[in-house]
Image: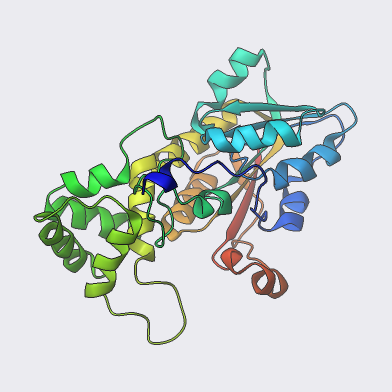
Amino acid sequence: MENDLHAPKPQATCHVPVMFQEVLAWLSPRPGQIIVDGTLGGGGHADALLHRVLPGGKILALDRDPDAISRARLRFASFAVHLIQGNFRDLPEILDQLGWECVDGILLDLGMSSDQLSDSSRGFSFFSDGLLDMRFNPQEGEPAWRLVNRLNERALADVIHELGEERFARRIARAIVESRRFQEIKSARELARIIHRVVPRPRFKGIDSATRTFQALRIAVNDELAALQSGLQRFPEIVRPGGRVVVISFHSLEDRIVKEAFRTDPRYSPLTKKPVTPSEQEVASNPRSRSAKLRAAMRT
C-alpha cells in the first residue's frame, strides 16, 4: 500500500470525452463567447470548445481535482483557458473574483474521470490496493474509508440504498459492519471483496456487483447531488439570456435532478424533451459512455 500511496501522478490524461459531437451541437459555442467547462477532467471537451470560441472568446475550466488542473496547465499553457480548482456550485463567486459579469454557456460532465479511476492511490477502482479515499479534492471532506468504518449499519445501508440504488444494501452494510469488527476496512480491494462475498455476481455480462456501492460512497463523500442541485439553481444568475446549459449525467438520480431543474425553473427553457444518449459506435469504442444522458436548456 505504501508504494501505491506515493506513486507518481500521471502526466498525461487517459480520459476520453463523452458525447463529443453532441456537446458541441447542443452548447453551440461561437467565436467571441465565454464558455464554462465546470468539470474539466482530461480537458477534451474544453479543448474542443476553445477552438469554437476563438478568436476573441475564452474558456473557464473548473475541476475539484488538483491533479486535473495540473495536467491541464501543461495542455493549455499557451491558450485562452482560465484554469481554477473549484466547485461549479461556486461559479457566481468565481466570476466575481475574475471580474466577469456573465457567460454564454456552461457544460457539466458529471461523475469521475478515467484518470481518477486509473490512479490506484485514489481508491475509485475495485482493484486498487490504495486507500479507499474517493474524494475529488483530497484536501476536502471525509475519505470514504472513514465513512465506511464510522457509520452504523442502518446509516450505511441507507447511503448505499439511496445513493447507489442497490437492492442488496442491507446485506452489504451488515457484511461491512461484521468485517470491520476484526479490522478496519482501508482499501478499495478489501471493500470489493466483502461485497463480492455477499452479493451474487451478474448471471450475464454486466456491471460488477460492487459498482453501486462504490458509486454511492463516491457521491456521498463528494456531496455530488447537493452540488448539482445548487449549481443548477445558481447558473441562471450568470448565464446570458439565450445562453445554454448542457449536463451529461451517468446516474438516474443525477438525471432526475437535471430534468426537474430544467422543467420547473422558469429561467430555463428545455431544449431536449428526452435525454440524448451516445451512438452505438461511441458505446462500442468507449463502453464507459453507455450510461451517459445529455440534457440541454436555454436561459430564458
Residue drawn at 20 percent across, 53 percent down? 156
Where is residue 228 shown, x and y percent of the image?
Answer: 47, 41
Instruction: Kindly give the residue lying farthest to the right in the view shown.
Output: 55
Instruction: In the displayed orientation, state which residue is furthest to the bottom.
Output: 203
Q: Is residue 231 above or below residue 281?
A: above
**Residue 265, percent across and down?**
51, 40
Total count of labels = 0
User: In this image, 72 relative to 275: left or right?
Assistant: right
When asked about the image quadrant of residue 81, the answer is: top right
Q: Is residue 72 above or below residue 112?
A: above
Residue 220 vs residue 263, the one in the foreground:
220
* Residue ID at (80%, 31%): 33
Q: Is residue 208 above or below residue 51?
A: below
* Whole-percent x, y for residue 283 in the image: 64, 71
Q: Is residue 273 left or right of residue 104?
A: left
| Residue 42 appears left or right of 173 | right
- Furthest residue to the front? 3
Q: Quadrant of residue 216?
A: bottom left
**Side of 89 where 96 appears, left or right:** right
Is residue 300 shown to the viewer in this render? no
Residue 292 in view here: yes
Q: Please give the name of the residue rendered at 61% of the width and 33% of the height, measured from the top-left corner.
A: 69
**Residue 176 position by quadrant:** bottom left
| Residue 108 % position (x, y) | 59, 44
Residue at 24% across, 70% down: 168
